[in-house]
Image: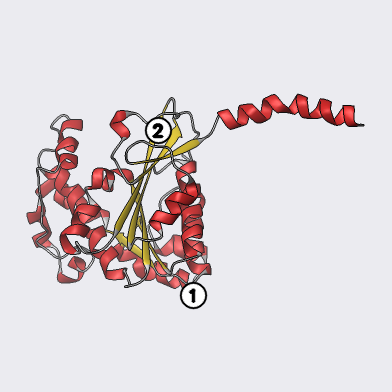
Amino acid sequence: MKTAYLFIAIFLLPSVVFSQQKPAYILYNAKGKKIGYEKMISVLGKKDIVLFGEFHNNPITHWLQLEVTTSLKQTRDLVLGAEMFEQDNQPALDLYLQGKIKAKGLDSLARLWKNYPTDYAPLVNFAKEHNLAFAASNVPRRYASLVAKGGFEALDTISAKEKQWLAPLPIVYDAELPGYKKMIEMMGGHGGANLPKAQAIKDATMAHFILQYYKTGSLFIHYNGSYHSDNYEGILWYLKNKQPGLKYGTITTVSQKDITALLAENKGKADFIICVDENMTTTY
């Protein structure tokens, strides 16, 4: 019998070793040093606001968002919020969190992303289960489109009620921020100077509603596309402009062919970097 067990153990050993050598992701700090999950949670647990930058279709990021949220809930009171909900959909989201409408009702009343059922519903349901506030932080897309076409001046044409769904106008804007300059470069000049302004109205609005929903003593976790908080810009720039005294933490997602060492171009993007194998399957 012992011989049989020994044979099974030896037979399975290669597959066990192989699985350990082929991780789906590795965590790094800003300097590119590998770190453990518990270390990241320990650091984030001391913050006031955490921006969790994702690839919208990456299942590893979405799984970790729920895991990180669950872990931090063990020691902190939480408030949640997300780019994926636009501010004018806050009433519908609140009705769902309060149990006054079902998931089908939320789908009818709010503009949900196509990957909501798989990627964001778990976070919203976590908030519902634990009676947490969940901020619909993003600017309604139609107003970002107005800015993309006509600059910030285009927002002068909307009503006072509609302006309640945006950051207070006029917003502070720095066209020299590297992230905004890079947007123009990436588009080859197409879209002109208004393209990063459309990004800025999103960043400013998300920062505004994060601060509106933030409660002293709590930890606010905000889920957003990585570009909105990479390199400590975007949303974080606006947060620090308004509330420099708060303690902020950032997470981002990157993908590499070889995840065993963080590429120089990915270092410094955030406090913690989720490096995912570029062959990872996507949710859409």
Q: Nearer the viewer, residue 185 or 130?
A: 130
Place of residue 129 in the rendered image (x, y in percent of width and height, measured from the top left): 53, 68
Q: Is residue 219 left or right of residue 163?
A: right
The residue identified by callout 1 is 100
Residue for point 26% across, 66% down: 211
| Secondary-structure class at tag 2 | strand
Residue 174 seen in render: yes
Q: Is residue 174 above or below residue 104?
A: above
Q: Would you say residue 139 is visible in this rendering?
A: no
Indicate the amino acid at tag 2.
Ser
Residue bearing mark 2: 255
- The label on residue 125 is none
Residue 1 spot, x, y in % from top left: 92, 31
Q: Which numbered disc flags the more N-terminal residue, 2 or 1?
A: 1
Is 18 located above or below residue 88 in the figure?
above
Within 10 Å of the Cα at label 1, are there few (<14), some (14-19), or many (20+) other Cα atoms?
A: few
Asked if 160 appears above or below 54 in the picture, the reply is below
Residue 86 locus on image (x, y percent): 31, 59
Separation (CA) of disc 2 from disc 1? 40 Å
Local SS, label 1: loop
Give the residue at x 71% y 27%.
Answer: 13
Q: Nearer the viewer, residue 38 or 142?
A: 38
Looking at this view, is 256 or 11 the one in front? 11
Residue 281 in the image: x percent, y percent? 50, 34
Q: Is residue 212 left or right of residue 73?
A: left
**Front disc: 2 or 1:** 2
Q: How many marks?
A: 2
Residue found 32% across the figure and 60% down from its top: 49
Q: Nearer the viewer, residue 28 or 95?
A: 28
The amino acid beneath tag 1 is Lys
